[in-house]
Amino acid sequence: MSSIISVANLSKTYGSGFRALKNVNLDIRRGEIFALLGPNGAGKTTLISIICGIANPSEGRTLVGGEDIRASYRKARSLIGLVPQELHTDAFETVWATVSFSRGLFGKPKNSAHIEKVLKDLSLWDKKDNKIITLSGGMKRRVMIAKALSHEPQVLFLDEPTAGVDVELRKGMWEVVRTLQQSGVTIILTTHYIEEAEEMADRIGVINKGEIVLVEDKATLMQKLGRKRLTLHLQGRLNALPDSLSQYELELCDSGTTLVYDYDTKGERTGITSLLSDLRSAGVRFNDLETTQSSLEDIFVDLVRTS
Amino acid sequence: MNYRAVRAIYLFEMARTWRTLLQSIVSPVVSTSLYFVVFGAAIGSRISQVEGVSYGTFIVPGLIMLSVLTQSIANASFGIYFPKFAGTIYEILSAPISYFEIVLGYVGAAATKSIILGLIILATAGLFVPLHILHPVWMLTFLVLTAVTFSLFGFVIGIWADGFEKLQMIPMLVVTPLTFLGGSFYSINMLPPAWHSVALLNPVVYLISGFRWSFYEIADVSPIVSIGMTLAFLVACLVVIWWIFRTGYRLKN
């Protein structure tokens, strides 16, 4: 699959000397939903701002649809729709006027049918003549999505689209995003909610302290998530593992009082039954046992801590 | 050239004018009428003619300039400051639109408003005093040049300001005094010689003088010098705006 966005060696240093992005390299594939995860202040919004033309990069090169964002900014930007994190709206405009304004701003000819479709898809049609100031937070968020879609972009950036949005609305938003993807739009979303990335994304990227620390297919990540860990608390101390248990790749921890076994829940056999019976024959006894499953959250927290 | 974007910004800004008709048009007209009542009728009736015209008639070009200057700055500075304040500037910056087009949209709308306002004040003045315009084409040229130049200046202030106080500061502290001291209400030839020389350092003197010349052929300085100074200020504003967009000053950092 070809890249629709290609970021190479991108850095950003603010006037204060703060390095928000450090040599970022990232390729977004055409048609995918890419989730960018990262803690607050990791550089997610800065990265999006640079790609969209809101902030100037200090170094590096970015291509959108093969067009350089600085040299051919007109072509590059006309491919992009941006929904920023904050609810920035023209309070006194009507929904219809503000969405039509966005279309004009991106140089597209008037097309009432398209605007009507966008507003209907986002359940805003009956609010089209309302002033934005009268709308609820969730509706304002959808107005901003409508503005971003008004000029038929190929790439849509959603910067924390569901922050502070209730569960039902969040599910509705996911539905909208899926429909968009089916119509061929590439979607890049940033989020704090691991659940959201798990639910929506084809690929997941993790950014921390201005650096991309991981980019992986969700499926691959989920395989890692499929691993479980069995921990056995032994009755006595074990100096070494008996040879009869060597096939299990066990780990002896806590000065020989704990045995750890990692296994795959998706495998045909987990190997637990045979392990337990082999332990018994080897004379290894235990007081207690527990199993834990690593989540995307654990992986995320781990990455962020070690990076 | 992204004409549709320029049109969108221009119409958006003009829509704001119609929405806020009271502040945009009615209030400057009311305050100008008050000037006529106070300076034209009450005080003016005690003043004999100034350089061959009645005092009430003499102050008309100055009053129009006073409004055009302040309103151009107010309209353009607010027009660009407000999206910065509300955050909606993100959309302008991320749109496929050049800096020139952004300026054309915002400054064009601000200048249009103050030109309309200038003409309304001119019509209002006609109700109070007899008017004649000897060089209507030059009158319109000065009006348009001044509106555009000071809208550009207002645009610069709107970008520079990072709070509502700063938005008010330059107009209040610099522009209003310069306008009052620039011969809106008197000919600088009426000043003592020393002050006359000081007044020539005030750029507004040239604008008002040229504008008044187009009405009555009365001028403090030659109209050629007036046009020259106005164009010089226009170019200076354009250079500052070019620099702002080139560096992203207060916009992209």
Image (cartoon, helix red, strand yellow):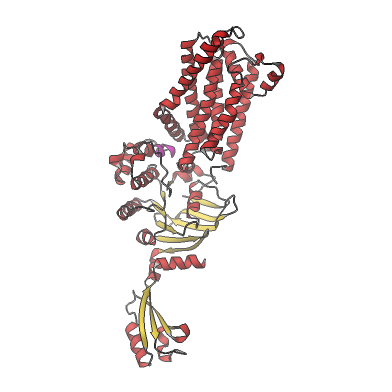
Q: Which residues are magenta?
A: A101-107
Q: Position of residue B113 (x, y in %)?
A: 47, 25
Q: Which residue is located at x 64 percent, y 18 percent?
A: B224
Question: Quarter-wise, where is residue B162 in the image?
Answer: top right
Q: Position of residue A123 (x, y in %)?
A: 29, 45
Q: Which residue is located at x 60 percent, y 11 percent?
A: B217
Q: Position of residue A187 (x, y in %)?
A: 40, 53
Examine the rendered structure and indicate whether residue A127 appears above or below residue A42: above
Q: Which residue is located at x 32 percent, y 42 percent?
A: A119
Examine the rendered structure and indicate whether residue A73 appears above or below residue B135: below
Main SS, magenta region, reads helix
Q: Is residue A247 magenta?
A: no
Left or right placement of residue B73 versus residue A195 in this view: right
Q: Position of residue B226 (x, y in %)?
A: 63, 19
- Camera sees residue A66: no
Extreme residue toward the left, this view:
A126
Left or right placement of residue B131 versus residue A227 in this view: right
